[in-house]
Amino acid sequence: MAKTIGVGVIGMGWMGELHSRSYTQVPIRFHEAVGQPKLVVCADEFEHRAEHAQRLYGFEKRTTDWRAVVDDPSVDVINLTTPNHLHVEIAEAVAQAGKHLLCEKPVGRSPQETARIARSVEEAGIISHVGFNYRWIPVLQYTKQLIDDGRIGAITHYRGGFLEGYAANPHAMLTWRFLKDIAGMGVLGDMMSHSLDMAHMLIGPISEVVAQKETFILDRPQSVAGEGTHFDIREDGPRAQVENEDYVSALLRFENGARGTMEACRVVVGEKIALMFQINGRSGAFHWHLERQNELEFYEMDDKDASNDGYRHLLSGPQMPFHSNFNPAEGLQISYDDTKIIEAHQFLEAVAEGRPSEPGLPEALRVAEVAAAMQRSWESGSWEKVTPISQ
């Protein structure tokens, strides 16, 4: 029997709208789902954004006070899509109220804040989910199946990265993502967190890292509060300092013995959205790139027939997880927005069934622990072990 779950969304920028839009699609794409959403209330500090979201997505109510969402008795789950500096206060209030939480990554401004939120969620016994939505791309779910089935043997090499040029223009606006008091980390939290979660899902825990960082563009035009995104350009007006890193790279050692590299950058010229990985095992390999997210290059050794040697080009299709919820044909595309619909569905199902949801705060904490080791390596210039975060 279906269970109706009251939803509140806090933070109605681009990501808050995307979460809201995703919930409206869950009953359509997953019509047999146990958890069915009801959009109760949306909140944003700017009235015009809250009003716009209510009108567009059909929320019953709107507010400029996030506390009203937490206190609303009709709300069962809360999506937190605000800038990072608000995550701790709101997440702890959500946990204290006994509501379930879907929080956007990186969950706080720092690994220490992620650990604090994870502790409050665990103590409250609520169900949590984190917005590592790239996990849900059907070909990546299929890649995970092939790895678990032993199709490429023991993993030996992993090369991951997330390279974008959205801030390559020095006139791209200084939004909150570039400021320590609001964002905290730069690309380490914003972009590399996705790559780390992907590596954890596919390969397993990372045990040791050595890392470096750089800020290539030192100042940017100041933005106007409540207007525009980090993709917008402004060539006039005052400029201010960029306060966090544009670039991070690292060497990795995995607990299972695999070795790897990882790189993230927001100012690289020529790359649009190059989230990608290359995985090598003892009997096969994978190549994948987000700009071709519905395609997977799969290599499997064939000692019996050398003419078969080489990568196979696989397309997303109904034989892969979640694809058939969106279309019945092999090769028809699954979009970025579709991954957020899957994310919302997975969270709602966990809440309806009263079980943990993955990736949740435990998975976000594992990502944060690797990030903390990278930060220590920036200072020491040496290999650092991935360890629990001290409170």
Image (cartoon, grey):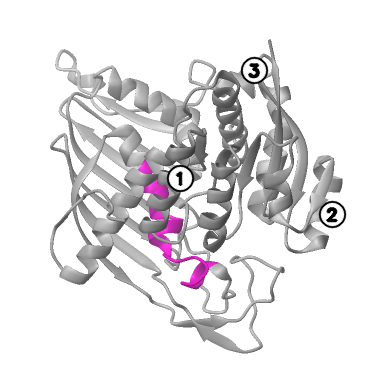
Q: Which residue is drawn at 58% across and 37% down?
A: 98
Confirm whether residue 167 shows in the render.
no
Q: How far apart are marks 3 and 2 (CA)?
A: 29 Å
67 with respect to 280 (left or right): right
Q: Does the magenta stretch include residue 101?
A: no
43 with respect to 96 (left or right): right
Q: Which residue lies furthest to the bottom in this view?
A: 238
Up/down of 84 relative to 378, above or below: above
Q: Residue furthest top?
A: 1
**Quarter occupied by the C terminus:** bottom left
What type is the residue that disc 1 sits on?
A: Ser
From the image, tell me which residue sits under label 2. Answer: 51
Q: Residue at x 76, y 64 (%)?
A: 46
Closer mark to the observer between disc 1 and disc 3: 1
Q: Tag 2 or tag 1, which sits nearer the N-term?
A: 2
Report the front residue among 314 and 343: 343
Q: Residue at x 76, y 36 (%)?
A: 39
Q: Distance between the residues labelled 1 and 3?
A: 29 Å
Q: Residue 147's x, y, as percent?
A: 29, 24
Indicate the secondary structure of the residue bearing disc 1: helix
Q: Which residues are the magenta region?
A: 177-197
Up/down of 86 relative to 2, above or below: below
Q: How far apart are marks 1 and 2 (CA)?
A: 31 Å
Closer mark to the observer between disc 1 and disc 2: 1
Indicate the secondary structure of the residue bearing disc 3: loop
Q: Do the residues labelled 3 and 2 touch (CB within 8 Å)?
A: no
From the image, tell me which residue sits under label 1. Answer: 120
What type is the residue that disc 3 sits on?
A: Ala
Q: Tag 3 or tag 1, which sits nearer the N-term?
A: 3
Q: Residue 27's x, y, as percent?
A: 72, 23
Q: Tag 2 or tag 3, which sits nearer the N-term?
A: 3
Up/down of 36 relative to 297, above or below: above
